[in-house]
């Protein structure tokens, strides 16, 4: 034991890591990730400048920095040549792309990607409501390659909580922005993240959030109980919420999410959606069913075998479900057919 006490007294903090706040250049590793063999995840951005009070990311990943547009476009061409039809743009704070570039925003990148021949779908992993400006609304409205799916973190649906979280919008601004997005891109599925039980969240504040989420009609919500991140301002706040209260609120929002997921899927029953099958569906005899995501991020299970993998298919949604929907293969599209269909 004495030995341990000696070490504790004499040890110095380990400081072998460079100061991440001084990193201002995107480390271009040039290695995309892949979901199955159909979607490629292309990292375009790292770090974040926002400093939300619950989040450690700006401290651990540094400030926002963007990958060089030429390098992204080059890699997009390579991915298309390798057979990928969908690219998911990822980052720590993806919508912050371009904040450190001169006169080049995420919307400019999206138009440049829109011109990549053979690329069928562009998805953004996540974007903040405040980053959806006029130019972005225009891309959503006019680019046929942009998926009808956006992930926009709300985090909390009460103005007092949002302020304490140091988020950059009010509930009214967020709600109004969702309206503008839906005008620009009808039928878009909007998914979100919510933190439940942030310090100081009262029943009334939680209820305000519940009502707002219901009014916005998200197509899915990822619900997380607040958990302290050492070193963040929120970890030092008073009025931490009891775990039991947090859990009850989490369950309430998961139930709401399931209702909203089903309601969103039901709107598409009878409609034909474009789906890229990712893999065989395990719950059916081998070679009989495939599963994949539609552009608006509904998971469809439909008749077909693995030779459909990675191809753009037209699938009629026949039965809506919470996490999976059933469908019927109508046709397989090649690029020429898609162009003709537009
Ligand atoms: S929650 Fe998102 S926006 Fe806020 S600091 Fe973390 S990464 Fe940045």
Image: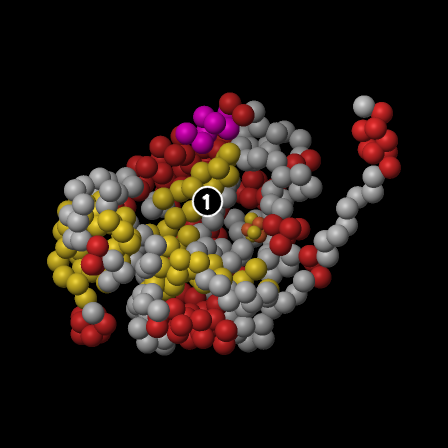
Query: Percent x, y for residue 55?
Result: 60, 45
- Relative depth, front residue between 328 and 277: 277
**Along the line of sight, the residue nearer the viewer: 57 or 166:** 57
Q: Position of residue 324 (x, y in %)?
A: 26, 43
Which residue is depicted at the point 25% across and 55% down? 277
Q: Position of residue 311 (x, y in %)?
A: 24, 62
Label 1 neighbourhood size at 10 Å, few (<14), some (14-19), many (20+)?
Answer: some
Q: How many marks?
A: 1
Q: Which residues are the magenta region?
A: 245-251
Residue 88, quarter of picture? bottom left
Judged left or right of residue 3, residue 150 is left
For the question of whether residue 284 can be seen, the reply is yes
Looking at the rendered image, the quarter that the N terminus falls into is top right
Residue pointed to by mark 1: 193
Spot occupied by residue 295 in the image (x, y as percentages of width and height): 29, 58
Left or right of 20? Residue 32 is: left
User: Does residue 306 sit above or below 263 in this rendering?
Assistant: below
- Inspect the magenta stretch and tell me whether residue 248 lies in it: yes
- Choose between 91 and 304: the one closer to the eye: 304
140 sits left or right of 167 in the view: left
Question: What predominant SS class does the magenta segment belong to?
Answer: helix
Horizontal placement of 155 versus 308: left or right?
A: right
Q: Quadrant of the C terminus?
A: bottom left
Give the residue displayed 63% in from the left and 29% down from the top: 239
Is 338 above or below relative to 214? below
Identified at 51% across, 58% down, the residue is 91
Q: Quadrant of residue 143?
A: bottom left
Identity of the residue drawn at 51% across and 67% down: 30
Q: Secondary structure at mark 1?
A: strand
Mark 1 sits near ligand 1, with its Cβ under 8 Å away? no
Q: How is the image coloured?
A: secondary structure
Is 121 contained in the magenta span?
no
């Amino acid at each position: 034991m004495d030995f341990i006490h000696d070490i504790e007294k004499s040890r110095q903090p380990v400081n072998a890591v460079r100061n991440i706040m001084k990193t201002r250049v995107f480390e271009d590793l040039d290695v995309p990730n892949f979901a199955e063999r159909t979607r490629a995840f292309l990292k375009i951005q790292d770090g974040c400048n926002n400093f939300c009070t619950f989040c450690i990311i700006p401290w651990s990943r540094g400030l926002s920095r963007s990958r060089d547009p030429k390098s992204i476009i080059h890699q997009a061409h390579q991915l298309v040549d390798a057979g990928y039809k969908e690219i998911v743009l990822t980052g720590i704070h993806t919508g912050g792309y371009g904040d450190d570039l001169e006169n080049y925003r995420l919307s400019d990148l999206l138009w440049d990607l829109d011109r990549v021949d053979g690329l069928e779908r562009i998805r953004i992993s996540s974007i903040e409501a405040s980053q959806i400006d006029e130019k972005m609304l225009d891309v959503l409205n006019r680019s046929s390659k942009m998926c009808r799916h956006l992930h926009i973190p709300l985090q909390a649906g009460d103005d007092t909580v949002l302020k304490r979280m140091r988020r950059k919008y009010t509930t009214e601004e967020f709600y109004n922005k969702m309206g503008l997005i839906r005008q620009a891109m009808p039928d878009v599925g909007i998914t979100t993240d919510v933190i439940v039980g942030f310090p100081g969240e009262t029943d009334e504040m939680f209820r305000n959030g519940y009502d707002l989420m219901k009014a916005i009609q998200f197509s899915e919500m990822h619900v997380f109980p607040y958990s302290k991140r050492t070193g963040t301002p929120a970890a030092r706040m008073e009025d931490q919420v009891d775990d039991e209260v947090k859990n009850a609120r989490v369950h309430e929002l998961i139930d709401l999410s399931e209702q909203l997921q089903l309601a969103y899927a039901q709107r598409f029953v009878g409609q034909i959606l474009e789906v890229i099958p990712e893999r065989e569906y395990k719950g059916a005899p081998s070679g009989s069913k495939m599963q994949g995501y539609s552009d608006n991020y509904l998971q469809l299970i439909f008749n077909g075998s693995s030779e459909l993998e990675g191809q753009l298919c037209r699938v009629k949604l026949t039965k809506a479900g919470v996490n999976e929907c059933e469908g019927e293969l109508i046709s397989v599209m090649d690029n020429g057919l898609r162009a003709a269909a537009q």
